[in-house]
Amino acid sequence: MSTETQEYMNGMRPGPLTREIPECMRDKYTVVQTVFDVLAFLMVAIGYIIQAIYRTIVGYPKKDLKGSIALVTGGGGGLGSLIALRLARLGCVVVLWDINKQGLEDTVKLVKGVGGKCFGYVVDLTKRDDIYRVGKQVDQEVGRVSLLINNAGVVSGHYLLDTPDHLIQRTFDVNILAHFWTVKAFLPAMIEQNEGHIVTIASMAGHVGVAKLVDYCSSKSAACGFDEALRLELEVKGVKGVNTSLICPYFIRATGMFEEVNSRFVPTLSSNEVADRVVMAIRTNEPIAVMPTYFRLLLPFKWLVPWPCISELIRGLVPDAVPESMRITHRRNKSEDIRNMVKSDSRPMTVVPPARHEREV
């Protein structure tokens, strides 16, 4: 694209037709041109809306994942292990990353037990160099990753002023910065082959703030922005074969993160249902999956009604995201032990894992 064309598209240079008309008529011509641009956009938008309605009624075609190499971060337990099982049943070669070696080994055995092919790698997602190193190792030992699921996440669960700095740093390292490094490690090969899918497991907390989850909500909000900007960037570059999906669930049961969350009106989600929904979003190339679905209709009201309404609703819906009982273990540990704590539950299919601080999935 020439410099003149780029400047014209950015509004820095008048178009060729505009230069040819008298100075006194240019403003009127610009208004007419804008009207035509808006009408053209509306026609295209209506077409997309009709297409979306049709697909909602008829359903989206499901792509075949057999033979794909799927990498799941945080795959040593919780939601990650459930997603891995479903992908293995669909014929994917599953690669699991987690900092918990025992959890990895158990999940790998579990996946192989259902006839799947699975590999486990111990990776510290807070370390960029470790991600790049193991990424190259996976490419050499397993093959090109075509399905990347950034699922790993941690939560500290304290009021901001009570949260140690190292826990805030860890939250951002795992919940969002690791997404940058994993995508940079595997996206180039996807673009080269014009085939791939990147899944960002975010949260409704990325759209709505909750007390005691300031660092968590901030990191998930960043994850939502990351997915949207990445999707748009791929479209601008003309990469049509690489898709992205943003997953925004409400609080999930049996993942070890929000087991005792005090939630009113809206029940917490089953981890099995969320895993099914993630796989469905992958197979149908769904850009955004919100759970429960009716939250899609409620989100726009956040920008339409006064803040006191939003505050009352959130405080009524989630009186306490991290009840005191979830932090009893934390009081009994020394601060140095807390820095080194990782997931202690090595049973990926446990229905109710024990409460623990710095819950990681």
Image: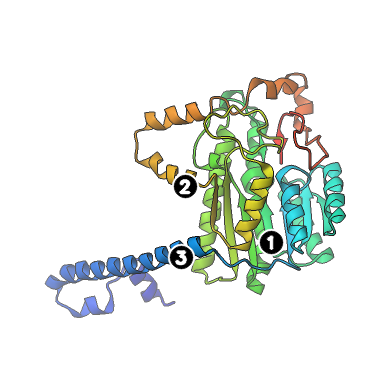
Can you say whether 78 is above or below 95 in the image?
Answer: above
User: What residue would you read off at disc 3?
Assistant: 54
Q: Position of residue 120 (x, y in %)?
A: 83, 53
Q: Is residue 256 left or right of residue 11?
A: right
Amino acid tagged 2: Arg
Amino acid tagged 1: Leu
Q: Kindly identify which numbered label has been placed on residue 147.
A: 1
User: What residue would you read off at disc 2?
Assistant: 296
Q: Residue at x 84, y 51 (%)?
A: 108
- 1 or 3: mark nearer the eye: 3
Residue at disc 2, secondary structure: helix
Can you say whether 318 is above or below 76 in the image?
Answer: above
Residue at disc 1, secondary structure: strand
Dot 3 surroundings within 10 Å: few (below 14), some, or many (20 or more)? few
Quadrant of the drawing holding the N terminus:
bottom left
Dot 2 surroundings within 10 Å: few (below 14), some, or many (20 or more)? few
Residue 11, visible in the rendered structure: no
Q: Position of residue 314 (x, y in %)?
A: 48, 31
Can you say whether 108 is above or below 351 in the image?
Answer: below
Q: In terms of sequence position, does the residue under pointer 3 or pointer 2 come before the other? A: 3
Q: In terms of sequence position, does the residue under pointer 1 or pointer 3 come before the other? A: 3
Q: Quadrant of residue 93?
A: bottom right
